[in-house]
Image (cartoon, rainbow, N blue to C red):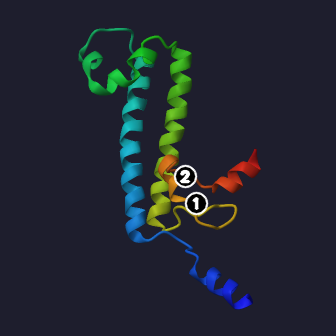
């Protein structure tokens, strides 16, 4: 029985393969691109008054149009700050991919599930560690 436990422990992955890391890098880059566009929209809603320029018809603007046009500058500022923080988390995840430490729980040292990373690509905690935080 003890021998089987050793074999199971040895077979357990300690990091994602380069191919898997590349998949996550592509997911993060796509989210980062969208997050930066959304941040620019929020930032411009703070600095510009309502106008009917070409931005009103851009596809990116349509995503936030309903909310951004009615946001107060204070609300838009808070959302812009949250968006900036999200961008920073995504950029940090890219660094972890380069260091080959991406997807490793900072609490348990075990791999974070692919499902969790696909949903929250900047996650640094596995679901068990996250639940213990609450």
Across and down, in percent, residue 9 comes to 64, 80
Q: Residues within 10 Å of mark 2 (few under 14, many from 20)?
A: some
Give the residue number, with chain letter if any, for mark 2: 116
Label 1, secondary structure: give it.
loop
Give the residue number, with chain letter if any, for mark 1: 112
Label 2, secondary structure: give it.
helix
Residue at left offset 25%, top offset 13%: 53
Residue at left offset 48%, top offset 67%: 99
Which label is found at residue 77?
none
| Residue farthest left in this picture | 54
Across and down, in percent, residue 49 comes to 39, 9
Q: Are marks 1 and 2 in contact (CB under 8 Å)?
A: yes
How far apart, in angstroms, are the residues tagged by discs 1 and 2? Answer: 7 Å
| Residue farthest front in this picture | 1
Q: Quadrant of the C terminus?
A: top right
Residue at left offset 33%, top offset 21%: 62
Q: Is residue 3 left or right of residue 62?
A: right
Given residues 125 and 56, the one toward you in this image is: 125
Whether 108 is drawn above or below 90: the answer is below
Q: Quadrant of the N terminus?
A: bottom right
Given residues 9 and 20, the one toward you in this image is: 9
Across and down, in percent, residue 56 comes to 29, 16
Given residues 121 and 41, the one toward you in this image is: 121
């Amino acid at each position: 029985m003890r021998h089987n436990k050793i074999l199971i422990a040895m077979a357990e992955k300690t990091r994602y393969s380069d191919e898997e890391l590349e998949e996550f890098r592509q997911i993060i880059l796509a989210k980062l691109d969208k997050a930066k566009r959304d941040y620019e929209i929020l930032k411009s809603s703070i600095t510009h008054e309502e106008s009917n320029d070409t931005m009103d018809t851009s596809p990116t603007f349509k995503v936030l149009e309903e909310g951004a046009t009615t946001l107060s500058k204070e609300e838009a500022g808070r959302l812009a700050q949250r968006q900036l923080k999200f961008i920073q988390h995504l950029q940090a995840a890219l660094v972890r991919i380069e260091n080959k430490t991406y997807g490793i729980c900072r609490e348990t040292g075990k791999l974070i599930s692919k499902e969790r990373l696909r949903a929250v690509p900047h996650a640094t905690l596995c679901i068990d560690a996250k639940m213990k935080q609450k």
